[in-house]
Image (cartoon, rainbow, N blue to C red):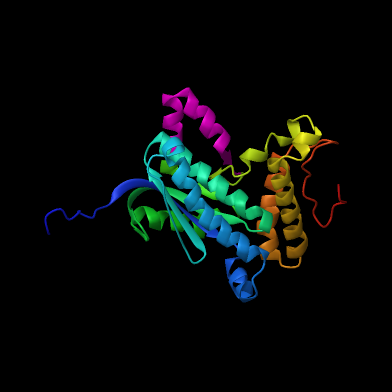
Amino acid sequence: MNAGEAIMSYAERYVAFVDILGFKEIIRQSEHGGRMFEALVKSLTSMGDRNKDLESVLGEDFKVQNFSDAVVLSEKVTARGLSHLLYEIQELALSLLPSGLLIRGGISKGSLYHEGSVVFGPAFLEAYRLESSVASVPRIVLTREVYSDVVQYSNDDDRWKLDFDSDLRYSEDGPVHVHVLKRFQSLNLHEPTIEFLNSDEVIHAQFCQSALQSLIDQSMHEPRHFDKVKWFAIYWNGTVPRGANAPLKTVAFPYMSRP
């Protein structure tokens, strides 16, 4: 090894493997452009740019790489690093949802090499296994070890308990998953002033609801796809509080009357 040459080695990191559902169909349509194709390119590009600005404030050593229909994100093994990783997953999910794109994946902890465009290691393989074999529906699930870290961080500092309690949800079938709709949870509790209803956040959330409703309507003839979208729609309906004057509406299923 030449003097000054860096030694390549694994580091212990949190890593998320995220699959963009419906990516193959987007590629088939990409020759003709299209809204979903443009949204995908914009989201993946802006994620890297945004993180350069937020890194020093929110994260510790955030890295992201996308290839084909997947995005790999990793962070340092600290409470702050994990909190930032969850935030970035939430942002990715909400940037894609208005175009009808859902994500599924897993978060693991362990040995990882992630430098530039190169990423591999046992932790990567475990995150990939979670996405392909455990997540099953549009959610990002945590390994037992990552969840144990959440519990430990929460016990060590009340601030992290509040953060992680709002960042994570418990699934009925067991796995803990990232609460990607966290930002929308309290929108219907605000006073519905004209200024609030015309805010970027409310308009963005309404686009998400409309896209999700379209996904339900379009997928009803394909049971395997419908089951995945239905899970996310139920998650949406359980997150967004109901109300007569609420700016965000629940998603209606084909066998229900529209709100």
Q: Magenta segment, which residues?
A: 147-171
Does the magenta portion include 112? no
Relative side of 120 to 68, left or right: left
Does the magenta portion include 151? yes
172 is higher (above) or lower (below) than 116: above
Furthest toward the right, the residue is: 257
Task: From the top left corner, tell me how far across and down residue 103 is, in percent.
Answer: 58, 55
Q: Is residue 133 visible?
A: no
Quarter assignment of residue 127: bottom left
Q: Residue at x 75, y 35 (%)?
A: 196
Quarter assignment of residue 34: bottom right
Residue closest to the eye, 139 or 40: 40
Which quarter of the rendered picture does the N terminus lie within? bottom left
Task: From the top left corner, tell me how far across and down residue 15 is, in percent.
Answer: 41, 50
Relative side of 54 to 114, left or right: right
Q: Residue at x 61, y 76 (%)?
A: 31
Task: From the top left corner, tell me how far across and down residue 204 is, in percent.
Answer: 69, 47
29 is higher (above) or lower (below) than 139: below
Task: From the top left corner, tell me how far across and down residue 215 is, in percent.
Answer: 72, 59
Task: Please tell me whether the stretch drawn in magenta is mainly helix, strand or loop.
Answer: helix
Tally the numbered discs. Answer: 0
20 is higher (above) or lower (below) than 241: below
Q: Is residue 116 visible?
A: yes
Residue closest to the eye, 202 or 142: 202
Quarter assignment of residue 156: top left
